[in-house]
Amino acid sequence: MNKLKSWSLSVMCWAIVIAIFICHIHGTGEAVGGEITIAAASDLNFAMKDLIGEYEKTTGNHAKLSLGSSGNFYAQIQNGAPFDLYFSADIGYPKKLEEAGLIVPGSLYRYAVGRIVLWTGKKSSVDVSRGIDALRMPTIRKIAIANPKHAPYGRAAVAAMEHYNVYSLAKDKLILGENISQAAQFIESGACDIGIIALSLALAPTMKAAGSYWEIPSGAHPPLEQGAAILKSSKQQDVAKQFVEFMQGEKGQEIMTRYGFTLPD
């Protein structure tokens, strides 16, 4: 009887030890896979979701995605927002964070160069194949772009319109989206007749089916050099580095190319 009690006690002790160990690894997140939070410019909406899906299948780690304008994320990070990785549509923002000592030294890199397009929905009467001259049509009432105050794609849109001398005609018709994805939604919903959005959005399957685009020549605006960095405040720096390496790998580069990004050498 005493032997039975002793055996039962031993089993219970081991069960407690195992339970504590399991709770510990779940609590730290290290043994069951890390999780990072990514702040990404809205032009990465579709590309980043594909990247995260492939990354999670490959590594077993997880990534939460927050999409928005690069400038707004820059301000949030300065104020201590708890992100691990920052993907900006303007490399200038992460460079400023580097100068402020807010990113992991050596983690800043240029991950792509973006492109912009004129885009219109299938129900629109605007002929986007006319190129930039389509913006001169008197029937156009509203033109969507991202807010140039904090969205790099909005600044590129204004620069392109100025390059082609159509900004003075268009400025009073501009409807500003909080970010480039919202600008695209304005056109897709019919709230705007036409707009200037990211090529990466126009190439997404849903957008392809909903409208058509004309690619604005890259010489019409300053290059959209896009930069990423790991934040020094991140508690998952190793996992964040792993995601960057995945993105730089063959599968990650294939996804970025599919969405129209020009990749760095």
Image (spheres, grey):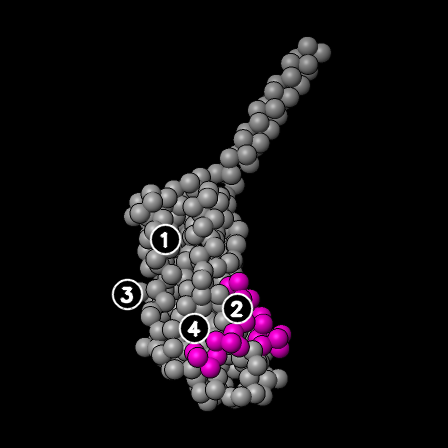
Q: Position of residue 61 (x, y in %)?
A: 49, 48
Residue contact between numbered discs 4 and 3, judged by CB atoms under 8 Å: no
Question: Which residue is labeled 4 in the image?
Answer: 157
Question: Which residue is labeled 3 in the image?
Answer: 265
Closer to the camera, 61 or 265? 265
Q: Which residues are magenta?
A: 167-192
Q: Give, as a three-letter code, the residue at label 4.
A: Ala
- The residue under the point 33% across, 70% down is 222
Which numbered mark, 3 or 2, is in the foreground of this view? 2
Using a 10 Å C-alpha cutoff, classify the residue at mark 1 as few (fewer than 14 neighbours), some (14 to 19) or many (20 or more). Answer: many
Q: Is residue 162 above or below residue 30?
A: below
Using a 10 Å C-alpha cutoff, classify the residue at mark 4 as few (fewer than 14 neighbours), some (14 to 19) or many (20 or more). Answer: many
Asked if residue 43 shows in the view, the reply is no
Residue contact between numbered discs 3 and 2, judged by CB atoms under 8 Å: no
Using a 10 Å C-alpha cutoff, classify the residue at mark 3 as few (fewer than 14 neighbours), some (14 to 19) or many (20 or more). Answer: few
In the picture, measured across the screen, residue 22 lies left or right of residue 248, that is right
Q: Earlier in the sequence, mark 1 or mark 4?
A: 1
Q: Hey, which residue is sitting farthest left in the picture?
A: 265
Q: Position of residue 204 (x, y in %)?
A: 52, 72
Which numbered mark, 4 or 3, is in the foreground of this view? 4
Magenta span: predominant SS is helix
Asked if residue 85 shows in the view, the reply is yes
Q: Hey, which residue is sitting farthest right in the picture?
A: 1
Question: Which residue is labeled 2 in the image?
Answer: 176
Q: Give, as a three-letter code, the residue at label 1.
A: Pro
Question: Which residue is labeled 1 in the image?
Answer: 94
Q: Earlier in the sequence, mark 1 or mark 3?
A: 1
- The residue under the point 33% across, 59% down is 110
The span from disc 1 to disc 3 (Cα, nearest Å) is 20 Å
Closer to the camera, 143 or 116? 143
Q: Give, as a three-letter code, the residue at label 3.
A: Asp
